[in-house]
Amino acid sequence: MADTTTTNFGFVKPEVGSSNETWGGKLNQNWDDIDGYLSAKAPSADPAFTGNSTFAGDVSISGAVKSVVYEDTFVSETSSTLDLSAGNVFSHTLTANTSFTFSNAPATGTAFSFVLKLTQGSGPYTVTWPNTSWNNGAVPVISSGNNDVDIYVFFTHNGGTNWYGFVAGQEMS
């Protein structure tokens, strides 16, 4: 039986009972390769991972955290359907009376929020919101001046069945 290699990285797996006088060189090469891969992602001098990372389960950070950078994905949307899988900060300019739909909210049990920057077009145009509870039950009146900007924040925890809406600012232009 000859040497084999690992599936993902191609590390040499020396044949058991064979590879006399050569197995040490093969394993040392494997370790050099692993060292290179790790150094490219988290150099030992400044071990900060680079690139995108996906974690399953809980993540905890202990010790002093010097800085955490969180970036939201901004989507300039012309449709009245906001695809929440595309981002969490949206911009929409009204060009007609609009009934919004919020699609692809995360499943029940996952809290989710997003921001909508709403610009009044040459209207004034009106807006209808989907299943949204507002402060004291009062649906906000959107700003009516040409190019007026209103900012809204929406929150759900039940897959978008119900939304809680908040006015973050009006007539921001």
Image (cartoon, rainbow, N blue to C red):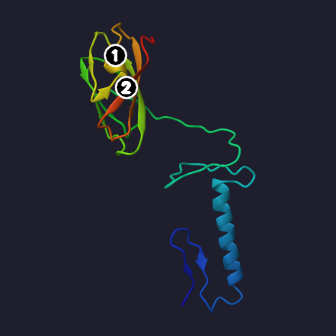
Q: Would you say 6 lies left or right of 115 here?
A: right
- Mark 2 residue type: Gly
Q: Residue 114: which disc? A: none
The front one of 25 and 160 is: 160
Asked whether disc 2 touches disc 1, contact meaning CB atoms under 8 Å apart, the reply is: yes
Q: Quadrant of residue 35?
A: bottom right
Q: Position of residue 107 (x, y in %)?
A: 35, 46
As drawn, 42 above or below 64? below
Q: Quadrant of the C terminus?
A: top left
Q: Position of residue 49 (x, y in %)?
A: 62, 50
Question: Marks 2 and 1, how far apart in space?
Answer: 9 Å
Q: Residue furthest top?
A: 145
Q: Residue furthest bottom?
A: 17
Q: Position of residue 79 (x, y in %)?
A: 29, 28
Residue pictured at 50% horizontal, 72% vertical: 7
Label 2: state its secondary structure.
strand
Asked if one can make out residue 79 in the rendered structure from this viewpoint, the answer is no
Asked if one can make out residue 75 in the rendered structure from this viewpoint, the answer is yes
Residue pictured at 66% horizontal, 38% vertical: 67
Dot 1 surroundings within 10 Å: few (below 14), some, or many (20 or more)? some
The front one of 169 and 2 is: 169
Residue pictured at 59% horizontal, 73% vertical: 11
Q: Quadrant of residue 18?
A: bottom right
Q: Residue furthest right?
A: 45
Q: Earlier in the sequence, mark 2 or mark 1?
A: 1
Q: Quadrant of the N terminus?
A: bottom right
Q: Residue under label 1, please give it.
A: 140
Dot 2 surroundings within 10 Å: few (below 14), some, or many (20 or more)? many
- Mark 1 residue type: Pro
Residue pictured at 59% horizontal, 37% vertical: 69
Q: Residue under label 2, please give it.
A: 165
